[in-house]
Amino acid sequence: MVSDSVYMQLALEQAQQAWDLGEVPVGAVVVKDGEVIAVGCNQPIGRHDPTAHAEIVALRAAAEKLGNYRLPGCELYVTLEPCVMCSGAMMHARLARVVYGAADPKTGACGSVLNLFEQEQLNHHTDIVGGVMAEECGAMLKNFFAARRAALAAARRATQA
C-alpha cells in the first residue's frame, strides 16, 4: 500500500503549479484504488471563480472521469485543511477519506475552526487524517506569503522613489 506521504507529495506538486500561476499554493489529488484519478490546484483568481479551490477542481475532474458526482471509495489529499465549502463538497461526493497537510487556523473545517465531518446530524461521514507532511505544506504557504509581502514592499518603495 502506498503511503499517504507519496500522494501528499503529488498534492505539493499541484500546490507549486498554483504558486506558478500566482495563486495561493494549495494542491489536491484524488485517489481511487491506489490510482491517482484527478488533480487540482488553486485557481480562483485566474478563473474568476470563488469556488475554484484545489479540492473543488480535483473533485470536478474526478467526477468527470468516473462519470458520477458521487465518488465512493475515493480519497482526497490536499496540502491545506479544507474550508467549509470544500468540506461540504467532499461530503456530498461521499469521499471515503480526506487527508490534509497543514492545519488552517482561520478557516479550517476539519477541526481547526470547526469539524464539519463530525456533525452527527449530517448524513455522510468521511474519515479525516490531518498533519501529513504538515511542515512541508505549511512551509510552502509561509514562503509564498513572505515572497508576496516582499514584492509588495519593493513595489511600494519603487513608487515612493
Image (cartoon, rainbow, N blue to C red):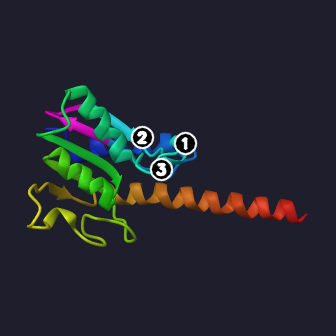
Give the residue number, with chain letter if any, for mark 3: 25
In x, y percent, where is residue 42?
45, 46
Q: Is residue 22 above or below residue 155?
A: above
Q: Secondary structure at mark 1?
A: helix
Q: Amino acid at mark 2?
A: Gln
Q: CA distance from mark 3 to mark 2?
A: 8 Å
Locate the N terminus and report the quarter of the image it occupies: top left
Give the residue number, with chain letter if any, for mark 2: 14
- Based on the picture, tell me whether residue 35 belongs to the magenta stretch: yes
- Based on the picture, tell me whether residue 81 belongs to the magenta stretch: no
Q: Is residue 145 above or below residue 77?
A: below
* 47 to the left or right of 70: right
| Residue 9, image quadrant | top left
Name the residue nearer the viewer: 8 or 60: 60
In x, y percent, where is residue 4?
23, 46
Give the residue drawn at x 25%, y 50%.
Answer: 89
